[in-house]
Image: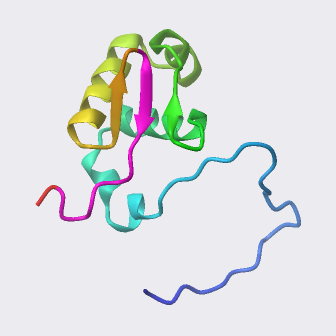
Amino acid sequence: MKYRKQVKPIDHRVRKITGSFSWIDHRFITERLIDLLGRDEILLYLWLITVGDRNGVSFYSDEKTASRIKLAVNPIQKAREGLIEKGFVIYRKGITQVLPLPLGDYYV
């Protein structure tokens, strides 16, 4: 693992975990998996990570998602299809589950 310089916060207002918690696997950036996704896929993926439970499961309708992330329903459905094809999520009967990130060589 590369050494990362420790940087002190600029301000005393440091974010803290309160209530529920979601997370993004850092490999999403470090292994450049984000580069595999289009803009709408990234937006939807971040939304799904944020609203999912501890197992990554969410049940927001396409209409509710559209109103919250300010996309039309059709681009949301297309983005979800892309995420499914690329192995980031699975979808069944109105329920979406964020999956563990694909291995770095998944697309090689």
- Does the magenta stretch mainly form a helix, a strand or a loop? loop
Is 12 on the left or on the right of 45, as rendered?
right
Q: Position of residue 97 (x, y in %)?
A: 43, 34
Q: Residue at x 28, y 55 (%)?
A: 102
Q: Position of residue 79 (x, y in %)?
A: 32, 28
Residue most toward the bottom? Answer: 3
Q: Quadrant of residue 7?
A: bottom right
Stretch of the chain drawn in magenta = 94-106
Instruction: Please say whether residue 69 is one of the residues in the magenta stretch.
Output: no
Near-viewer residue (101 or 63): 101
* 5 relative to 62, above or below: below
How many labels were placed on the picture?
0
Residue most toward the left? Answer: 108
Q: Position of residue 74 (x, y in %)?
A: 33, 13
Residue most toward the right? Answer: 12
Is 85 on the left or on the right of 32, as rendered?
left
Q: Quadrant of the N terminus?
A: bottom left
Q: Residue at x 40, y 64 (%)?
A: 27
Q: Quadrant of residue 41?
A: top left
Near-viewer residue (99 or 104): 99
* 18 relative to 104, above or below: above
Instruction: Please say whether residue 102 is one of the residues in the magenta stretch.
Output: yes
Q: Residue at x 59, y 37 (%)?
A: 53
* 39 relative to 33, above or below: above
Near-viewer residue (52 or 12): 52
Q: Residue at x 23, y 42 (%)?
A: 86
Q: Quadrant of the C terminus?
A: bottom left
Q: Position of residue 92 (x, y in %)?
A: 35, 21
Near-viewer residue (69 or 63): 63
